[in-house]
Each structure stands twice: as structure tokens, then as C-alpha cells.
Amino acid sequence: MTKLYNSVGYLTTEDILLVSEKKNLTLEEVDILFERIISYGIVILDTAPDTIDESSIPVEDVVITISHRGYILRIPLASYNTQRRGGRGVSMIEARANGFVDQMYVNLSHDYLLFFTNHGRIHKIKTYEIPESRRLGKGKLINELLQLVPNETISHMIPISSMAVNEIMGRNLVFATRQGMVKRNALFDYLNIPKTGIKALSLRNDDELVSVCLTDGNQDIIMATHKGMSIRFSEADVRTMKRDTTGIIGIQLSENDWVVSMDTVSEKNSILDTILVITILGYGKKTSIHEYRKQVRGGKGFTSLNCTDKNGWVAGLRVVNEDKEILIVTKLGVTLRTSVAEIAEMGRNAQGVRLINLHEQDEVVAVTQVTRRQ
């Protein structure tokens, strides 16, 4: 390997993985090997066969869903017509075959996708590499797209428009875990991601990754919990750390409570932006950002929604804009696309109104914002 360093200015992932296999290295040792190679100034090339002509793939909004059984789908956003608040929605997947829906995202077909796993690792592919499916299709096992190890599952995914060095400098990834921990890393730390993935963060044995946000270093973080609590604090309160650290406390949790989602607020946020909170029973409301005052990281936070037997516990929180739309997805694969303007604005302690009319034994598992493109 030393001779190879001296003869070329790059290595391929196949070169490195071949050495790893011969030496019988663990995943942690593979991580160290990649880091040492990068420290020498060696560029790591992905030499997977490039058989896809990007110019032949339309640039369009797509919906990505991941089920708890590991099936992933890519469906054009245009497959979903806008409905009024309180509707039944439309069936999105064959839930019986795929398992319950866990996650949903909306992004462009040419975006990079960063996948974060329950082992604290990160993987990368292009959105269009996920086979397109019809709305009631079964999808594809994510293990056929990513080199996951046994018992490794996807915890979160974020889209990145470009991984060019000049585009990612100054940008950060902020991580939030179920037990209220937060961590910040420079996105540049993840510039070279091999096919086997690399370690993104360390997790305690009884903790798991809940959410990841892309930030510019000057934003506020909002964390929301299952029992309706939330906290807002400056991103600067979370110092930049090394990849193999666990992070620091973001919110103090009460007994039997846990973090369900995280989002960001910028000083440049439009006056049309509000905070949307939605519950597992399909209720939700918008609240002015100004009611979410900034606090010190590590506190207990304040109430973001009054949870009752009628409206249920919190499923998620999102910063939304009046000019945009949201997609709500349930564990049985039913999806409702509706305008943010349709949702009533209320105070933090309100219970909200019905946003989606759920079938028996169904519940909301995810909500995401989409942009109406002309």
C-alpha cells in the first residue's frame, strides 16, 4: 500500500476493500484505514460501473419511503393529488408485503442520498439509483442497494444536492438521538464515503439515531418529544466534534419520554414560516415561530402541544411555510398531500385539529414538507 501511495494520487474503493478483506479487518479498522489514506491527501474514487446517463433521467420531485422490513420505494410526487385537510388520503404502498412505513422524504431525483444507520454509519447513493415504482408497488430491499452488515437498518436519510468540495464547505450535519443527545460534525468529514459506509457517530447501547439536519452553522435547533415537549437552542451551543463521539445533551427528558424529531430555524426564516406539530392520531396545528423562544441547550424545554386521549402523542415537528405543502404518511402506507395554508394556526398549548382521517389501528409515522414547483 505504501508503494501505491508513492505512485498515484488516488485509490479506488476496490483497492482498499481488497486489502481489508485480505487482512480480515473489522468495520472500525476499515474506518481507520480510510481516514489514514485521506490524511495522506489521497483521493478515493468510486469505481462502480457508471452505466446510467444522467441526462436521460428527468429532474423531478420524488417521494422516498422506507419500511420497517427494509423496503425502499421511489415514486414521482406527481402521483399524489393535493387534498383538503381532514381527508382519508390515498394508499401509497402494499403495506402487507412491505411492512409498516417508518420514514418518508421528498427530494429531487438527481440528489445524493445520505443514509444513516442504527449502527451509527453513513452510506451514500444517488436518488435515481433507487428503482422507480408504481404507487402500490412493493419496492426494493435496501440491502440490495447498500452494503449493510447483519442487523443494520436505516434510521434516517437526508438529500444533498451536491457533494462537490466548494459546495459543502461551511455546512454541518447535526444529529439527534432518541435519548436527547445532539452532535455536530462538518459535512466535509463525510466527503469520501466508500461502498461499505463509514462511521458517522457513536451511540450508546440503549440509544438510537432519530434525526439528522443539514445546517449552515448559524441556525437554531428545535427538538420535539413523544409527550409534546420541545426545546429551541442555538446550533453554536453544540461544538463541532469528531466522528466517533456520542455528543452532548440537547434536551432533558421526563420519565418514559423520548425525542421523535428535530428541525432547524434560521434568522432568515420567512414571516410565513410556522412550526407544525402532528400527532400519531392525525391531529395537528401550526404555531408562530416566535412562541418557541430560544433557550439554553440541555434544558427541559416547554410544551409544544397538549397531548390527550383524543389527539394522541406527538409523531413529529416540522418548520413549514404557508406557500408550501406537506405529505403525511401512516404506518399502513396511506398518504395525504395537503397545503400548509389549510392547517389552523393555534397556540403552543392547543390540541390541534384533525389533519388526516385515519383507518382503525392506523397511525401517523412521518410528515415532510414539499415545494410546489411550476
Image (cartoon, rainbow, N blue to C red):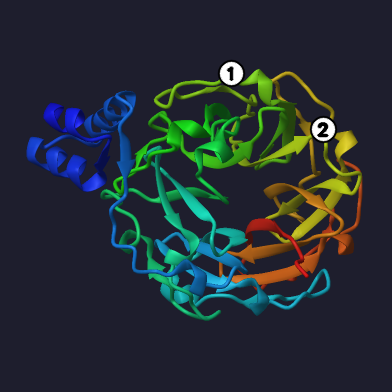
* Picture coordinates of residue 320, whole percent (x, y): 79, 51
**Quadrant of residue 83 within the rendered picture:** bottom right
Q: Mark 1, residues whose alpha carbon is within 10 Å: few (<14), some, or many (≥20)?
A: few
> Which of these two is toward me, 100 or 34?
34
Q: What residue sits 24% from the left and 34% below the top?
A: 30
Residue 327 drawn at (x, y percent): 69, 64
At x 66%, y 28%, the residue is: 217
Q: Is residue 344 above or below residue 349?
A: below
Q: Can you tell which quarter of the image residue 210 is in?
A: top right
Who's the residue at 67% across and 76% down the image? 78
The residue beneath circle 1 is 239
- Residue 44 at least partly seen: yes
Kindly state the secondary structure of the residue where label 1 is placed: loop
Task: Give the position of the C terminus as an image quadrant.
Answer: bottom right
Tell me the residue at 49%/61% (across/down).
Answer: 127
Q: Is residue 47 left or right of residue 66?
A: left
Q: Of residues 230 and 217, which is closer to you in this image? A: 217
Residue 212 rendering spot, x and y as whole percentages: 56, 40
Q: Residue 274: x, y in percent?
A: 85, 46
Marking on residue 248? none
Q: Amino acid at mark 1?
A: Arg
Q: Is residue 51 left or right of residue 263?
A: left
Give the secondary structure at mark 2.
loop
Q: Which mark is residue 267?
A: 2
Mark 2 vs mark 1: which is more N-terminal? 1
Label 2, residues with CA under 10 Å away: few <14, some 14-19, many ≥20: few
* 323 relative position to 241: left or right: right
Image quadrant holding the N terminus, namely top left
